[in-house]
Structures are given as C-alpha cells and as structure tokens.
Image (cartoon, helix red, strand yellow):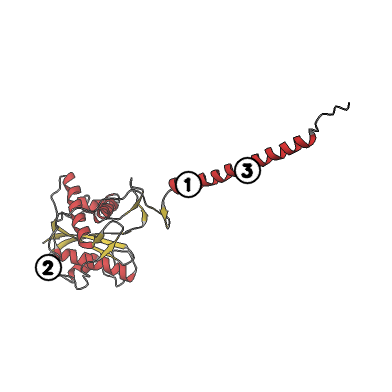
Amino acid sequence: MDRRRPATGDTNADGSTDRALVRGLVNLLVAILLVCSLALGTALFAPQFIDGIDIGEQPSPSPEPPPAGERNPAVADSGNPGASSYETDVEMVRSATVEDFVHAKINDRRAAHDLPPLEWDGTVASVARAHSADMARRDYFAHRNPDGEAPADRFQDVANYCQGYGENIAKTWLGRRVSQADDDGIVRHRTAEGLATGLVNQWMNSTPHRRAILEEGRTPRWDRAGVGVYIADDGAVYAGQNFCQEW
C-alpha cells in the first residue's frame, strides 16, 4: 500500500505566502501609523513661528500709564507730528502712551539713584517728537539732521529758555523680533509698556545715554525733560528724550 505523506511543499508555500502577506499588511499599517504619529507630533510640538517670528507667551495689554503732562503747549515745534500709532496682536500702541511710560520709567531709574524726578515739558517734548518723525521720514538716525542742525539748534528755533540741552535717541520696532544689548536678548515689543521698557533699557545699557539720564560726569543738572515718540506705518519706532537745564 502506498502510504504517501500529504505533500507539504505546496502547503508550506501557501502558508508562507499567507504569513508574508500578513506581515506586509502589518508593516504597512505600522508605517502608516508611524507617519501619522510623526505628522501629529510636528503639529503639536514644533516651535510656533509665523514668518520667522516666535509667537511665545502672549503679554497682557498695557495698564494706564501715569500721565506725563501737556501734549499741546502754547509754544511747540512746527514739525511736531502729533499722535501716531501701530496695532499689534495685543493692543493698539499709541505714541502718547509710550511717552508717558518712558517718562515715568526714567524718573523711576533716577529715583533709584537718589535723583529728583524730571518735570515734563511739553515744548521740549514737541522738539523731540518732531526730530523722531523727521528721522523716520528722511530715513536717518542721528542727533544732527541732514540740514546740519544739532539738538540745541532745533530747540532754539522754537524757544530759548534752556542754557543746557541734551538728547537721547533710540530706534526699534513693534511686532518684530529685535536684539537688545542686555539680559533681554531677543525681544518682540507688542505693547506700549513693553516698548517703553525696551527703550529705557537701551539707554540705560549705553554709557553715554545713561550718563545723560543720571547726570553723571559733566552732564548738566537737568530741570525738565520731554519724550517724543513717532511710530511709522511699518512698525518702526523712533524715540527721543530731550533734557533741559533752565537759565
């Protein structure tokens, strides 16, 4: 009797094919899941940038600043542009609000060094504001304008009650990442108070500007000061603080 074993060759081949098919499907599913998990991970954990700007933590809107003083003095620079503003993703940043904050923060820094507060002078502020706007419009950044006028010259064109006169200027941006030469590193100004803090930090971290604020060295003893901020349509910010020692 011919007892033949069942042919196992084909059976094994069929089984291997089935197992290979199953393994292929499993591998395919694993690959799909892996791709999906990687895509999900990117969506959830990748740093959030928009046009190269890190969103970071959302700051709170600015509180009301201490009012510095008059904005429409009887005597003012004819180039005074008045108010300017720029809207960020947090708030509408208005130049007058920034000026109020800068004036208050400068007086805080002076108080920390046992110096009296500077009185706000609307005329001096108008001269500072006119120069800030002129720098923006004529695309330069300097104490002396393209016409050759220095800070004291510009003030004397308007009034003549200051025997000593000084000026600090700064330029930065709203809504963009900017580097600062201090512990803040890279910052993005999005509020009026944050912008004012950045401007004051720029000056306090620069020796000549700090000396003007704190009346160090041969700096006159200031009686009054005015801050002039101009915010351009593209978010560029030009700022000046002018100091006066009266006759």
Badge 2 marks a residue whose secondary structure is loop
> Would residue 22 be visible to someone looking at this image?
yes
Q: Which kind of residue does numbered mark 2 sit on?
A: Pro
The picture places residue 15, in percent across and down from the top left corner, at 72, 36
Which mark is drawn over residue 25? 3
- Gap in Å between the C-alphas at discs 2 and 3? 81 Å
Q: Which mark is residue 40?
A: 1
- Residue position marked by numbered label 2 in the rendering: 73
Image position of 215 (left or right of 247): right
The mark nearer the N terminus, 2 or 1, is 1
Specify the label residue 200 is tagged with.
Answer: none
- How far apart marks 3 and 1 lie (CA) works out to 22 Å
- The answer for how far apart the CA atoms under marks 2 and 1 are is 60 Å
Dot 1 alpha-carbon crowd within 10 angstroms: few under 14, some 14 to 19, many 20 or more:
few
Instruction: Name the residue nearer the viewer: 156 or 34.
Output: 34
Quarter of the image holding residue 90? bottom left
Task: State the quadrant of the C terminus.
Answer: bottom left
Q: Quadrant of residue 23?
A: top right
Q: Position of residue 111 (x, y in %)?
A: 16, 46
Say which of 187 and 114 sits in front: 187
Q: Nearer the viewer, mark 2 or mark 1?
A: 1
